[in-house]
């Protein structure tokens, strides 16, 4: 089967919904795996996702829904993974179908918790997916702005740039602009780090430290990201490209950013536990902060901002003290 073949969206959240909308601009049909049968039934009846991006209407005759993950995997050639990283393994470990001949596109902005592995690495090691058949999607792009038909920008990464270009055409449109890259690992690590730094930006905002301080935080965060990504995957890259700097900025500043909103609650005085309970959706930076901390024990990159967020989230260090330590490192 010529790539991408039959495509399946795996996940039922806002990002999965936005990507399904983009795919259906260019694909005649898609398959769609959702865990809950009641959500599928409501989707068919309402003609939109009943829980996320409810203003986006779908031609449901062009969608084959299923709650059977193995059925979807057997029937499709390309699996677009779009579930939150903390729940990734609970979905994927149900798979018994052979994935070695499939293509995997990860739109997951996180690392596999506990394993501390990139999603693409996990799929290659666990399921034998070929490196040239593993792709990643990153922003700068919010699902909510896709739903609002605002201009959106996506980067598709793959070691096989021809595959990246083919899949880019599957999601490109009048308002969706695509860029290709071969920097798979760099894109994945940057997507994790920008969520961590967005929590930091939210804390600064909630604590009313001001725009001047936030600008210093972001200028130091992008250099910290560059140091880490260059250490774990040394190769030429321009950290000012949209997939790195642009995605960091949109996640740090946007009102749609759940990581920023999570951090803002902490900055206003919520405990970490209370802020997590208040969130209606997953703030992936919470999990990403621990994964990056654990990975960096091996590389020992200087990361005062990421370390400060880890201290706040996992060591109960007060935001005031952690922010003061971050500020001492600014230059």
Image: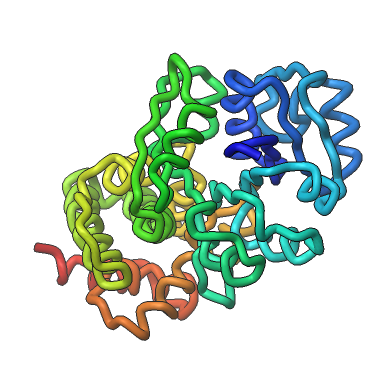
Residue 253 visible here? no
Residue 240 horizontal side relative to residue 233, left or right: left
- Residue 185 locus on image (x, y percent): 39, 60
Residue 154 versus residue 221: which sits nearer the camera?
154
Residue at 85% over, 40% down: 66
- Residue 220 locus on image (x, y percent): 19, 59
Residue 24 horizontal side relative to residue 256, left or right: right
* Quadrant, the N terminus: top right
Residue at 62% over, 48% down: 81
Residue at 39% over, 72% down: 318
Is 240 rendered above or below residue 21? below
Is 197 rendered above or below residue 59? below
**Residue furthest to the left:** 331
Is 12 rendered above or below residue 64? below
Residue 53 versus residue 238: which sits nearer the camera?
238
- Residue 303 locus on image (x, y percent): 27, 72
Residue 31 versus residue 285: which sits nearer the camera?
31
**Residue furthest to the front:** 1
Q: Quadrant of residue 200?
A: bottom left
């Amino acid at each position: 089967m010529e790539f991408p073949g039959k495509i399946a969206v795996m996940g039922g959240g806002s990002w999965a919904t936005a990507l399904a909308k983009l795919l259906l601009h260019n694909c005649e049909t898609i398959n769609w795996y959702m865990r809950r049968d009641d959500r599928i039934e409501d989707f068919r009846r309402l003609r939109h996702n009943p829980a996320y991006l409810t203003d986006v209407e779908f031609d449901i005759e062009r969608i084959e829904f299923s709650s059977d993950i193995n059925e979807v995997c057997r029937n499709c050639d390309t699996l677009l993974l779009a579930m939150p990283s903390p729940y990734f393994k609970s979905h994927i470990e149900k798979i018994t179908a052979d994935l070695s001949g499939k293509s995997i596109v990860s739109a997951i902005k996180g690392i596999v918790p506990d394993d501390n592995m990139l999603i693409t690495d996990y799929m290659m090691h666990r399921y034998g997916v070929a490196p040239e058949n593993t792709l990643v999607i990153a922003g700068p792009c919010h699902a909510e702005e896709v739903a609002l038909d605002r201009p959106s920008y996506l980067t598709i990464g793959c070691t096989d740039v021809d595959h990246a270009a083919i899949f880019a055409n599957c999601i490109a449109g009048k308002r969706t602009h695509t860029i290709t890259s071969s920097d798979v690992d760099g894109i994945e690590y940057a997507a994790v780090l920008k969520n961590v730094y967005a929590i930091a930006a939210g804390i600064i905002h909630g604590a009313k430290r001001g725009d001047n301080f936030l600008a210093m935080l972001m200028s130091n965060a992008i250099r910290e990201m560059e140091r880490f990504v260059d250490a774990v995957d040394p190769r030429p890259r321009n950290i000012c490209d949209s997939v790195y700097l642009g995605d960091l900025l949109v996640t740090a500043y946007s009102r749609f950013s759940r990581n920023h909103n999570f951090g803002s609650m902490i900055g206003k005085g919520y405990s970490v536990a209370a802020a997590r309970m208040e969130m209606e959706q997953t703030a992936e930076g919470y999990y990403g902060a621990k994964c990056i901390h654990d990975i960096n024990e091996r590389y020992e990159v200087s990361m005062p901002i990421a370390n400060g967020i880890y201290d706040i989230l996992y060591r109960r260090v007060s935001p005031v003290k952690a922010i003061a330590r971050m500020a001492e490192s600014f230059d």
